[in-house]
Image (cartoon, rainbow, N blue to C red):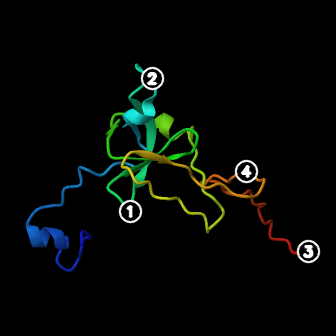
Amino acid sequence: NHSWSSVIDQSPYFMLYGHKPDISHLQIFGSPAMVNIPKAQRGQKGASIAKRLRFMGIDTTSKCSKFIDSSHRIVLSRSAIFEEDADWSRIHSNDTGVYFSKDPAADVTQPDDQDSQVNVPSTSSSKSPVPSSHVPDVEPDDGEDE
């Protein structure tokens, strides 16, 4: 447990080990990274060996990180270099939106190899997906009952 306890005035981890936990391996959600493209997917000689993607988290079933590309595909990779000195004003401009399927039964399959791409399931309706940050417009209530 890494949570602070006011009773002992320290975290249980610190009480057990005598030092703070190392969190240097953690990355910021949405941060850009250069992700290695496997040789089998590169194509011709001289093709790019890495692609700039956004970090989406850690995959729970493998030791891979999840990234998303501009076409909203999930990419699982173990080899990436994070751009820690990136310009955050561009990152927060929402130039790459994250979309989720409205179908709760949709499932993203786990790839067999470590560095591969997985397509995010799409909805069966003709409506376009709604971005996760979408907030519907609500008319303000003026307090008058009709």
Instruction: Give the number of the mark in front: 4 or 2.
Output: 2
Residue 110 picture quarter = bottom left
Q: Mark 3 and mark 2 in contact (Cβ < 8 Å)? A: no
Instruction: Give the number of the mark in front: 1 or 3.
Output: 1
Q: Mark 3 and mark 4 in contact (Cβ < 8 Å)? A: no
Q: Which residue is mark 2?
A: 44
Using the numbered discs, state the Cα–Cα distance from disc 1 to disc 4 in whole angstroms. 28 Å
Q: Secondary structure at mark 3?
A: loop
Instruction: Give the number of the mark in front: 1 or 4.
Output: 1
Please identify the residue farthest to the left as the structure is shown: 18
Three-letter code for the amino acid on which mark 1 is drawn = Thr
Three-letter code for the amino acid on which mark 3 is drawn = Glu
Q: Mark 4 and mark 1 in contact (Cβ < 8 Å)? A: no
Using the numbered discs, state the Cα–Cα distance from disc 4 to disc 3 in whole angstroms. 36 Å
Residue 103 picture quarter = bottom right
Q: Which residue is mark 4?
A: 128
Q: Residue at x 24, y 68 (%)?
A: 2
**Against 142, is 87 above or below?**
above
Looking at this view, is 11 or 65 the one in front?
Answer: 65
Instruction: Give the number of the mark in front: 2 or 3.
Output: 2
- Please state the horizontal and vertical placement of residue 72, each as a whole percent of the image: 57, 45
Quick check: can you spot residue 21?
yes
Of pointers 1 and 3, the one earlier in the residue sequence: 1
Please identify the residue farthest to the top as the structure is shown: 46
Three-letter code for the amino acid on which mark 2 is drawn = Gln
Instruction: Give the number of the mark in front: 4 or 3.
Output: 4
Q: Which mark is residue 146?
A: 3
Q: In this rendering, would 138 be left or right of 33?
A: right
